[in-house]
Amino acid sequence: MPATCTPDRYAVIGHPIGHSKSPQIHAAFAQASGQIMAYSAIEAPLHGFAATVLAFRAQGGRGVNVTLPFKLQALALASDALQSARAAGAANALKFEGDRIWAQNFDGVGLVNDIQCNLGFSLAGKRVLLLGAGGAARGAILPLAAQRPALLAVANRSADKAHRLKRDFAAHVELQTGGFDELAGEVFDLVLNATSTGLSHAALPLPAHLFAADALAYELVYGQGLTPFLRQARAAGVHQLADGVGMLVEQAAEAFAWWRGVRPQTRPVIARLSVPLV
Ligand code: ATR
């Protein structure tokens, strides 16, 4: 059989990986765009990420998505890291070309595409608050700042970690940073929850009147229904609530386009994966 009959191979690598929606998303993209490719889920041992990636490449793999807890290691493994991955300090997509391993991080652009294109919320001139200062928040900062909000603020449980982000990004963007208690009296058009409380189901100590009229509350976690953050937003009168399903599908579309040179439609896949926020 000629080599062209063999599907190009991709995978998502994480630990655990059973929950990943990526195989479903990429299968839908491949089918809709007529690409001959196979996409699987691989669980790497906690101390075996690099070996797993290199074995997949040796078997003919063309690229991988990387999820928790390996995004930092994915960047370290790359021979060539693109700006998105360097700025985030982590990679969520790798592409293999000969001996080279290219690294990208599409989480931030996926988030911005979802907010602006799918939810119709323009970031320019808006007051934007990012809750959290971990990896998820770090990856969102430059893509959000590129859309020229009037203010980009970062609040975190430990204010020190937020201040560290301010220093790390000082060359690119002026962030307002602090602890949650410093939010009293502030009002935002968009509040994004990039803490891990969407998964742990912990409530955040948010002040009253944090949300402007017509504000959007965006939870980066997906598939959890109404998280404590979204409940808080709804109780504060926010009508526009979103979780991270659109971000997930949009970052997948960016990776697909990077690997295959074809940008798939995202809306039908988002509709299929969405969990009602009730
Ligand atoms: P990720 O890569 O998903 O961002 P992370 O780097 O471990 O994960 O960061 C988790 C984020 O959630 C941090 O901002 C953390 O706050 P601290 O830096 O103060 O630890 C935040 N977080 C986790 N649990 C929280 C809670 N119960 N209340 C408020 N913030 C919380």
Image (cartoon, grey):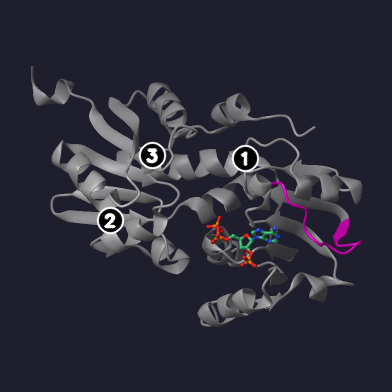
Compare residues 77 and 123 and report the one nearer the observer: 77
Residue at x-position 80% and y-position 32%: 278
Kind of residue sitting beneath label 3: Phe
* Residue 128 position in % (x across, y down): 72, 64
The residue singled out by tag 3 in the image is 256
Quadrant showing the N terminus: top left
Secondary structure of residue under mark 2: strand
Tell me the CA gap for discs 2 and 3.
Answer: 14 Å
Residue at x-position 39% and y-position 21%: 31
Taking the image as shown, residue 125 lies to the left or right of residue 135, namely right
Classify 156 as above or below 113.
below
* Residue 41 position in % (x across, y down): 36, 33
Compare residues 3 and 217 and report the one nearer the observer: 217
Marks 2 and 1 close (CB-CB < 8 Å): no
Asked if disc 2 is less than 8 Å from ligand 1, the answer is no
Quadrant hosting ligand 1: bottom right
Whether residue 39 is visible here, answered yes or no, is: yes
| Label 3, residues with CA under 10 Å away: few <14, some 14-19, many ≥20 | many
Compare residues 38 and 231 and report the one nearer the observer: 231
Tell me the CA gap for discs 1 and 3.
Answer: 20 Å
- Write the start and end of the magenta stretch as one range: 201-212
The residue singled out by tag 2 in the image is 102
| Label 1, residues with CA under 10 Å away: few <14, some 14-19, many ≥20 | many
The residue singled out by tag 1 in the image is 222
Q: Nearer the viewer, mark 1 or mark 3?
A: 1
Residue at x-position 40% and y-position 25%: 27
